[in-house]
Image (cartoon, rainbow, N blue to C red):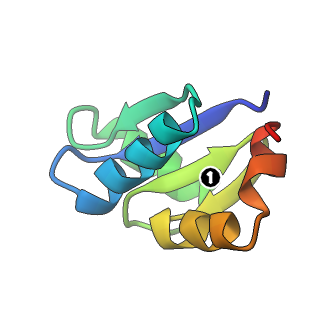
Amino acid sequence: MAKIEIYTSMLCGYCHAAKALFKQKGIQYTEFDVMMRPGRKREMMDRAGGRTSVPQIFIGTKHVGGYDDMAALDARGELDPLLGIS
């Protein structure tokens, strides 16, 4: 199974939606809250090509983008293979 990392903020509805989708699929992830640990925001921006919004989602070494990007992958049937589930 791929390593999942998600940069979030506790006030972000899209962050909650992304985490709920992972939970629904039984996927464990590592969460980095950019509000509680501001240094993580710079790290996120560096990894996400300058994007400043949360969530920013990484599956393995692939930057998926935000929740809308991940939901689109799921709708096309492309998310589960990235996650290593069938």
Q: Is residue 1 left or right of residue 35?
A: right
Q: Is residue 38 left or right of residue 32?
A: left
The spot of residue 29 in percent (x, y) is 54, 29
Name the residue located 66 percent from the left edge and 60 percent from the top edge: 64
Q: Secondary structure at mark 1?
A: helix
Name the residue located 40 percent from the left edge and 39 percent from the top edge: 40
Q: Amino acid at mark 1?
A: Arg
The spot of residue 34 in percent (x, y) is 31, 43
Q: Quadrant of residue 1?
A: top right
Q: Nearer the viewer, residue 76 or 38?
A: 76
Residue position for label 1: 47
Name the residue located 69 percent from the left edge and 57 percent from the top edge: 63
Q: From where the camera sits, is residue 1 visible?
A: yes
Name the residue located 37 percent from the left edge and 66 percent from the top edge: 53
The spot of residue 2 in percent (x, y) is 77, 32
Total numbered circles: 1
Q: Nearer the viewer, residue 65 or 27?
A: 27
Q: Nearer the viewer, residue 35 or 55?
A: 55
Disc 1 packing (10 Å; few <14; some 14–19; many ≥20): some
Residue 37 higher or lower than 82, as above or below: above
Q: Quadrant of residue 4?
A: top right
Extreme residue toward the left, this view:
11
Q: Nearer the viewer, residue 86 or 30?
A: 86
Q: Which quadrant holds the C terminus?
A: top right
Q: From where the camera sits, is residue 49 visible?
A: no
Q: Quadrant of residue 20?
A: top left
Residue 66 higher or lower than 27, as above or below: below
